[in-house]
Amino acid sequence: MLKRALISSALGAALAAAPAAAEALSIAATTSNMGMLAKHVGGDHVEVTTMAPPDRDAHYLEARPSMMSAIRRADLVVSVGAELEEGWLPAAIRGANNPGVRAGTSGYFEAAAQVDLLGTGGEADRSRGDVHPAGNPHVYLDPIRMGEIAKTLAARMAEMDSANADTYHANAEAFAERADEYVDEWRERVDGAPGVVLYHDDATYLLDRLDVADLGFLEPVPGNPPTGSHLRALVSELEGKDGVIIRYPYQREDHVNFVAEQLGWQAYELMPGVQVDGTADDYFELIGDWVEVIASPIE
């Protein structure tokens, strides 16, 4: 009996002295693309909650209790930045009452702040639409910039969890290398493509990366709805040219159909991001879908 008691006591002491297993970093990602990247970089060492699904316009969400709950338990908030989430993320962070993830702290990460942006220098004025002074925030549609963001995100995770730093950096490097390989292939695929009309000024990042012309936007100003006069002017400008039109599920189909019918072009509906809990494979497949649509007029 005494021997058993001694063994039990020794085992209990050993368990008490053993270091606790590292807890996974809790991450609240604003969009599905940011959630995908955080999960890819963090692997098994992170738990990611995505606050905005890809079928909703991240410009115009409202702070919700579910967002505040995710932020309240988060070690790190991963946002797109450049004011994309300005209408709801600051309010959600205030409501979460988690000072460790407020803007300016190590627990707050902005993807757009890690890379060079297109369209810098606009004046912030909601009457003029979604004009972002810091630049166009839609960096997630450029795989190369996403690779750069992955590396800086890995560095941030490594600061918070040094025990798994090597894993974070390796995962980020793998993503960036894969992006480089795909972009080389995709540039060849779209060589000679006439260009794209977008509903909103967002996928210009992908078009710029692939050296494909953006032929115009259905919105007269980013964030302002299309007007009849603007659409007619766009048709007049593009008459006799070739191209494709792309919209998202939450953007009005009738505006797209009007321009497509007038020009005799094909119109396509694509997603701006992976599904919630999507993987890197899903992301590269998504961009591949964009590439096939862009290349369709040259087939």
Image (tube, rainbow, N blue to C red):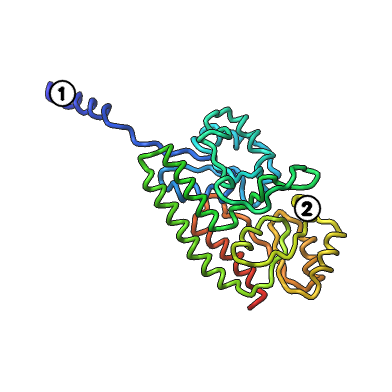
The quarter in which the C terminus is drawn is: bottom right
Q: Quadrant of residue 127?
A: top right
Give above or below for 1 relative to 61. Answer: above
What is the x, y in percent for residue 278?
52, 53
As drawn, the label of residue 166 is none
Give above or below for 49 relative to 238. Answer: above
Q: CA distance from mark 1 to mark 2?
A: 77 Å
Give above or below for 209 relative to 100. Answer: below
For badge 1, the amino acid type reads Leu
What is the x, y in percent for residue 63?
66, 36
Q: At numbered mark 2, what does the secondary structure look like: helix, strand or loop?
A: loop
Q: Is residue 271 left or right of residue 161?
A: right
Q: Quadrant of residue 187?
A: bottom right
Q: Is residue 220 left or right of residue 66?
A: right
The quarter in which the N terminus is drawn is: top left
Foreground: 288 or 8?
Answer: 288
Q: At numbered mark 1, what does the secondary structure look like: helix, strand or loop?
A: helix
Foreground: 45 or 277?
Answer: 45
Residue that numbered label 2 is attached to: 221
Residue that numbered label 1 is attached to: 6
What is the x, y in percent for residue 51?
59, 42
For badge 2, the amino acid type reads Val
Task: Judge the density around disc 2: few (<14), some (14-19), many (≥20) Cα neighbours within 10 Å.
Answer: some
Please tell me which residue is depicted at 72% across the width and 64% down the height of the picture.
Answer: 197
Q: Is residue 56 visible?
A: no
